[in-house]
Amino acid sequence: MWLRHLRGPAVLAAVTTAVASLLATAPPASAVVVQPFAKRYEEALYGDFLTLGNTVLRCPSAPRSAAARCAGAQAGRTSENNNQFAMEYADTAGLGTAVLNSSTGRVTVPPGATVAHARLFWGGNDGTYKLGRNQIARCDTAGPATAPPGSPLTRRPLVSVGGAAASRVAVRDAVRTPAGVGGPHYYTAESDVTSLFSGVATGVEVPVSVGDVWAPTGKGCVGGWSLTVVYKYPGPDSTYAPTRRNVYVYGGHVVQQSKDPDTTIPIDDFYRAGGGDVRASVTAYEGDANVAGDQFLVNGHRIGDPDGGGTGNFFDSHADGALDPDDHNNFSIDAKAAVIPSAALPPGATSAALTFRTKGDTYLPSALAFSVPVPDLEVTKTAAPKKVAPGGKVTYTITAKNIGEVDYPGARLSDDLSDVLDDADYDGDARATLGRVSYQRPRLTWRGDVPAGAAAKITYSVTLHDPLRGDGRLTNHVTADTPRTNCAAGAPDPNCGTAPVIQKRRDPRPPVPSPTSTRRPATTPPSPSPCATATGAGADGPCPAAGAPQHHPSGPAPAHHAHGSELADTGSDESPLLLYGGFAVSLCGLGALALAAVRSRRG
């Protein structure tokens, strides 16, 4: 786009000087990738993204002829562009007299949704231009540029959402084109502004005003902002979020010139479901409606300009959601979303290559959003029983339920039994209601297709060792090897794992009593009679006749246990009994001898 306003010898001289200098000093083409596109946000959700933006520069207000020509060019009635007009600040949002500029856009968050993420991008020319060996204070070679005070990398724009008081935003990822790059130089910056959308009204149009964006004024100057808003629901919404989507937001800084190779941003880790559109939005500066050759591609397929520019002139300075000013061609910034045809990303696709290309117009891509419908599996794992003894069996059940509205083909789950097999043996009985299950020690693997609303159940069991030989724990987790489930590797969801408790076996034998642990009060049995061994004693002797009733002194009754037989006393309690028993027997013997002696003397 540069130099197109020059004519005849001026073009030849400028081009000759620039080419000679660039051949000698220009860095390689990859140097224009000042900041490679990098992921700023990613989430699988029931929702989508919205993109809006606007310029902070507008046509000159004077002279009247220039203002009329510029308005005609913006409306598409002439082939002129901003290089022919000294662009000046727009100030339509009423953010105060101290701001450089301002403009307003509009966004409608669907009814009942919440804002999951909002990211502001802004930028434009930095007021310098590298022409040959010289760096001049211009946005383009057509005329001088006037830069505002301060640095473009540190100035903090003002943002107001829904008429609330404007807030200064933090500056993130601010970069500018290196001084050694030929041609116009730009800067870009970003900020996470999600907090500004807390409690925002839904189902109605909400104004978003942005102001005090650093930007130079003059011929060929550009400056503006874009906003990507991601909304979501807690579950499927039949009107606004019928299917789950992967939503990505990227940021970067690439000066895409006609001499440069393509710039491609790869996106993967998704499975494109059959229902719903694939969508992408881009933010770029300096795209001219009257200069063709710029393209946006997905997997090599050229995407048509959603506002009618065809596939050969995608970047034409049109911003979706522009409210004030509201020019179809704003001469500064593209911020627009397009539907990606199925030919570029058919159902079953798992990656996308998004490419910026130009063979004519120079432009600066700085932001990208992408959303693709994806299936969703909700995975749970349970074990029964929850408590098991050595030698017992545990049955595991894994359930993979498709909670989306589209089929989930090619799902893969794996279950590593390493932490189980030290205490148990796999029983070789894995079964699945859908798909196929296999086992190769120590891993059980399942693959299958799960229709929308259906569930696959995988069951298997293990038998515990008796006695145990491991760590006494049965902890393991199921892992999804395909995306968009709750059980990805390292996922914290407790539903992905289980840990039955191993009970300790109780010893059925009664404990052996210790000398002191079973002691009970001692009982004194009756002393044996001295007549226990005597025979022939008369009624008048010391021992009653055999068979005669014996009378003992009353004493304490022997103790009895409430249940079962009485255990004998052990230990030192038995010694007195033996002593007393021996003494009684001796007395009985002496008595018998004395009686015999008396009878002998009488005879």
Image: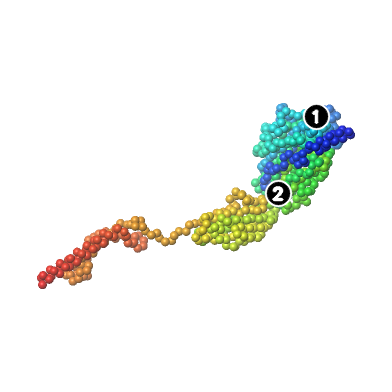
User: At 34% from the left edge and 57% from the top edge, which residue is drawn?
Assistant: 515
Q: Position of residue 502 (x, y in %)?
A: 51, 56
Image quadrant assignment for residue 568: bottom left
Of 205 and 539, nearer the camera is: 539
Number of the front mark, 1 or 2: 1
The total of numbered circles placed on residues is 2
Q: Would you say residue 35 is visible in this rendering?
A: yes
Query: In the image, which disc is placed on residue 590?
Result: none
Query: Looking at the picture, does residue 77 appear above or below residue 378?
Result: above
Query: Looking at the picture, does residue 449 appear above or below residue 297?
Result: below
Disc 1 marks which amino acid?
Pro
Disc 2 crowd, CA 10 A, few/some/many (<14, 14-19, 20+): few
Disc 2 marks which amino acid?
Asp
Q: Does residue 129 appear to the left or right of 390 in the view shown?
A: right
Of 425 and 370, nearer the camera is: 425
Q: Residue furthest bottom?
A: 603
Q: Does residue 155 appear to the left or right of 295 in the view shown?
A: left
Cα–Cα gap, marks 1 and 2: 45 Å
User: At 54% from the left edge and 58% from the top edge, which residue is drawn?
Assistant: 422
Asked which secondary structure carries label 1, the reply is: loop
Q: Does residue 450 appear to the left or right of 390 in the view shown?
A: right
Name the N-terminal-most of marks 1 and 2.
1
Q: Would you say residue 334 is visible in this rendering?
A: no
Q: Position of residue 589 (x, y in %)?
A: 19, 66
Residue identifier under label 2: 268
Q: Does residue 289 appear to the left or right of 379 in the view shown?
A: right
Of 353 and 406, nearer the camera is: 353
Q: Quadrant of the N terminus?
A: top right
Q: Position of residue 382 (x, y in %)?
A: 58, 55
User: At 65% from the left edge and 60% from the top edge, which residue is drawn?
Assistant: 436
Q: Residue furthest front?
A: 24
